[in-house]
Image (cartoon, helix red, strand yellow):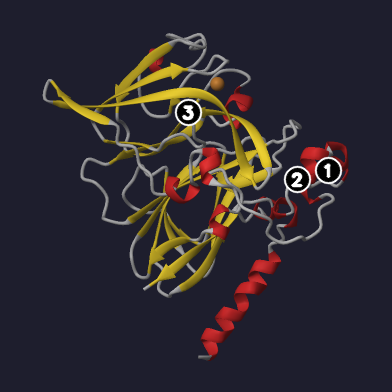
Amino acid sequence: MLGGSLAAASLPVAHALIPHESLHGGQTAAAQDPGHAAANGSPAHAGAGHRGLVGSVDPRVNGFDPAKIVRDFDYGRTRREGGRTVREWTLVAEDKEIEVAPGVKYAAWTYNGRVPGPTLRAREGERLRVEFVNGSEHPHTVHFHGIHRAIHDGIPGVGPGNIEPGDSFTYEFDAEPFGLHLYHCHSTPLADHIAKGLYGTFIIDPAEGRPNADELVMVQNGFDTNFDRENEVYAVNTVAFAYEQNPIRVKRGELVRIYLVNLLEFDLLNSFHIHANFFDRYPTGTRLEPTEFSDTITQGQGQRDILELRFPYPGKYMFHAHVSEFAELGWMGFFEVVD
Ligand SMILES: [Cu+2]
């Protein structure tokens, strides 16, 4: 009873330690006044007082919902060819304005109308075909991480190179190695083509599979809303504070597997910290044995890890970037652990 009331009391305290006045105050000060923001060092801190939670991002406006993206795996279409499974997807590049925090619009470039793009999921050893259709106003590619031939590497100047607006190309390769990978546009300037939103998670399951779990995809990203090559908004799965407003519900005692990918541009490092718990870490997901048991990990750009954990107690548990500035600017959320 005492423990329960202490735990309950600690939540608002922990919450208050993470100020988020700037984004919740509506349009970021930085977006409207870059000079002022720069003078204050930490852009969106400038100007806005704590006005509390103002609105939320309507998923219908964006056409995608972080609450769904977190458990949305795209297995594509399969067929058998020569005794082998061939898995196919279509990715369409599309220019699209999205809302990354309440009132903060961003002129994104997307795969299939969403940021991050669909989480493509295959099994080790399959043949994969990805038809890329460029419906954007700009040349783009799709560069997959994995092992494949140069002409299917999706970079300018090799193989088909840049795919021009209106053109298409089908990338084809085998699903190897198993693990947690990513795909992104590789046109230049590279940082811009990635930061605009052309990226997604690419999972190759080991042939023997992994133990059953409640599986979650978390793509750490950010948005440079005033074109100063720094991010003003940070998130997992694009919408700042999405999982603070709408916590991720998980079951007590159940194995939770997080596919954590860092697709942040302009900042060298990102990090993930879970409160009141620890996880097993599988770097790049390419081995079946964890290498670390921790509550905080750091990832460079393009780095990713599979994290596995169970929550022993019910309640609300925070997770966030342990880069505190990122947490304050949107990269934080909660797990709601239920019986
Ligand atoms: Cu591009």
Q: Which amino acid does label 2 sit on?
A: Thr
Query: Are the residues at dot 3 and dot 1 in contact (C-beta closer than 8 Å)?
Result: no
Q: Residue at x 30, y 36 (%)?
A: 75
- Residue 20 spot, x, y in % from top left: 70, 57
The secondary element bearing badge 1 is classed as helix
**Which residue is most to the left?**
83
Q: Which of 126 and 193 is in front in this view?
A: 193
Disc on the earlier residue, 1 or 2: 2
The answer to whether 195 appears left or right of 118 in the picture is: right
Q: Which of 97 and 174 is in front in this view?
A: 97
Q: Nearer the viewer, residue 265 or 73?
A: 73
Residue carrying label 1:
37
Looking at the image, in which quadrant does ligand 1 appear? top right
Disc 2 to disc 3, how far (Cα)? 26 Å
Query: Are the residues at dot 2 and dot 3 in contact (C-beta closer than 8 Å)?
Result: no
In this picture, is 134 found above or below 291? above
Q: Which amino acid does label 1 sit on?
A: Ala
Residue carrying label 2:
28
Q: Can residue 149 be seen in this view?
A: no
Q: Residue at x 57, y 15 (%)?
A: 137
Tell me the mark number nearer the camera, choosing from 1 and 2: 2
Residue carrying label 3:
111
Query: Are the residues at dot 1 and dot 2 in contact (C-beta closer than 8 Å)?
Result: yes
- Residue 168 spot, x, y in % from top left: 41, 12
Q: What residue type is labelled 3?
A: Tyr
